[in-house]
Image (tube, helix red, strand yellow):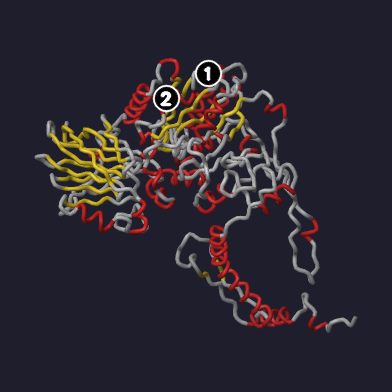
Amino acid sequence: MRARPAARRRGPCGPAMLRLGSALLARLARPRTPLRRCGAAAAGGEEQERFVFLEYEPDPAERAAAAALRRERELRPRRERRARGAAATVPSLADPSVPPSGVSCSGCGAEMQCGDSGAPGFVPADKYRSLLSEGPAGLRGAVCQRCWALAHHGSALRLRLPPDEHRRVVSAALRRPPRHGRGPLLLYVLDVMELPDPVLPQLPALLGPDVPAAGVLVVGNKVDLLPADCRGHLGRLRQRVAAACALAGLRGGALVDIRLVSAKTGYGIEGLVSRLQRSWKCAGDVYLLGATNSGKSTLFNALLRSDYCKSRAPNIIDRATVSPWPGTTLNLLKFPIINPTCDRIFRRQERLKEEARKTEDQLSREEKKYLNQLKKQGYLVGRVGRTFQQQKSSEIDFDPDMLSYSMDEDPRDSPKKHEEREEFTHNEVKDARWCFDTPGIVKEDCVLNLLTEKEVKLVLPSHAIIPRTFILKPGMVLFLAALGRIDYVEGEKPAWFSVLASNLLPVHVTTLSDADTVYEKHTAQEFLKVPMGGEERMKEFPPLVPQDITLKGIGTTEAVADIKLSSAGWVAVAAHAEEELLLRAYTPKGTALVVREPPLLPYISTIRGARIPGTPAYRTKKPPSFVENLRTTGST
């Protein structure tokens, strides 16, 4: 074979390099000038300084390749969006001839299978076979199609489940024979905004007389979403939870303790871990119970990243899938609990004391950034750390062949090695106690059961709730989206209505004579927002049904009661002392409307700004956030 001419050979003496050399010689012949700064550095920005260097002239082939690369980068996001859309709309193929795997989805706990796309744990047949071909560890750590859609696209695939399937799974799990000679500890998680909890009274029937439970520890979750209406509001919330437990028949020795936490921001988690570790000697396994959307899976993930689990568990066990869609968890998920020996408890307490002495200025840049993100999401924030961590290997794995290649070749990536998934040894788990996350019990008469995925995301609050207060006269009406309506029918003086709901839900005030017209014209439209979808959506959505409520005011700054509009939120009503009000509240047919007395946040109407001239609304005010176990700057 005839060799190519030397002038066309790629290498250090190619035409591009020759032109670069000529340009450099010409440059050196000119008077020297300082390098010019450009970009954000020239404008005094904080970005790293960039300098203009002499560049060589690329040949036509290189220019064409660079232009093609730029076009590829511009088109890549568009192609990826189209691919995601296609993946979400194209039905996945099932293969009923392949038997179920016997391996649980690491996100929801359902048994993974490819035979029925409408059943829990479904994985497309091609992907299922691919995972099986990787050996026994192929399916371990994988997630089903539903968990994948929830985690990556925020969409929930509909499943065919019997109405009481979640309840059956929970009941069967609790009736397992006790291990270690002790009954299970039940960690009941309730949403404090949903008080009175609709599932808590069903707990004795769910357990049955043959479940020798070590007790029930009630966890009031999502306290970070509620603003402090006065000093000591957490103590009052705890009293409200205790009253709900007593009403459900939980008292005395059956009720171990009540804890207020935020599984999302970490508030109260360290205290909960310490309380759980004190129950080690008198309890066996631990089960997380509660209604749908109470935050059980979020709490499961928080405990998985704390001192409550074995040190290697976070590297072996995947986090549970978390979604606002009710009923995300379909079966049992678990992690092994660490044995709280005296030495471990001492080391943990030393870590907590050291962290409590820190101020925010002493935190690292990453910790400050994460803390600021949590402050935007909730009023109460906690820092969850780990005392016992598995040390990571410091060895660097590289391929020496990647460091040497000829000028005639482009560097190539070496094939990726298959990473072996860590597994527990037999000795680690043979006598272990486990913490189980169970499916949520579906709430009956809940407005969330009537909503679509997009509507649920708007209704369930994900950030700190900012109270919105209005002063209404008799004959005025307040709409909370199109999910709730309160008419001020009779009264002599104005009253104050404070709305506590998702910040994304609109509130509209009108007159009683125009209320029906407003609802008919704007429901399922952008004005009232939820439900959405126009006339077609409203054909299947139930109408609003009324309920008359009579209240007597106790003061202009203290609410007499909360009108809870199912799970859409509530309205705290304050009126002049001894003033009698006749209200008419509406919720969709088939959903629960609750008058909560005493109110959850009685002084919430004081958390407001000045009255907006010409309107019944007050300006909103957001109280500052509080970080647990962090010393304020300047304190001693």
CA neighbours of label 1 inside 10 A, class few (<14), some (14 to 19), many (20+): few
Can residue 604 be seen here? The reply is yes
Residue shown at the point (46%, 28%) measured from the top left: 188
Q: Is residue 359 left or right of residue 401?
A: left
Q: Position of residue 401 (x, y in %)?
A: 80, 58
Q: Position of residue 1 (x, y in %)?
A: 90, 80
Mark 2 sits on what residue?
258
Residue shown at the point (13%, 32%) measured from the top left: 577
User: Are the residues at dot 2 and dot 1 in contact (C-beta closer than 8 Å)?
Assistant: no
CA neighbours of label 2 inside 10 A, class few (<14), some (14 to 19), many (20+): some
56 shown above or below 471: below
Q: Nearer the viewer, residue 20 or 454?
A: 454
Q: Nearer the viewer, residue 442 or 298?
A: 442
Give the amino acid at mark 2: Ile
Question: If you read the primary sequence from the N terminus, does the residue marked by circle 2 or circle 1 appear first?
Answer: 1
Q: Position of residue 143 (x, y in %)?
A: 61, 46
Give the amino acid at mark 1: Asp
Q: Is residue 248 left or right of residue 85?
A: left
Mark 1 sits on what residue?
210
Q: Position of residue 36 (x, y in %)?
A: 53, 72
Can residue 626 be seen here? The reply is no
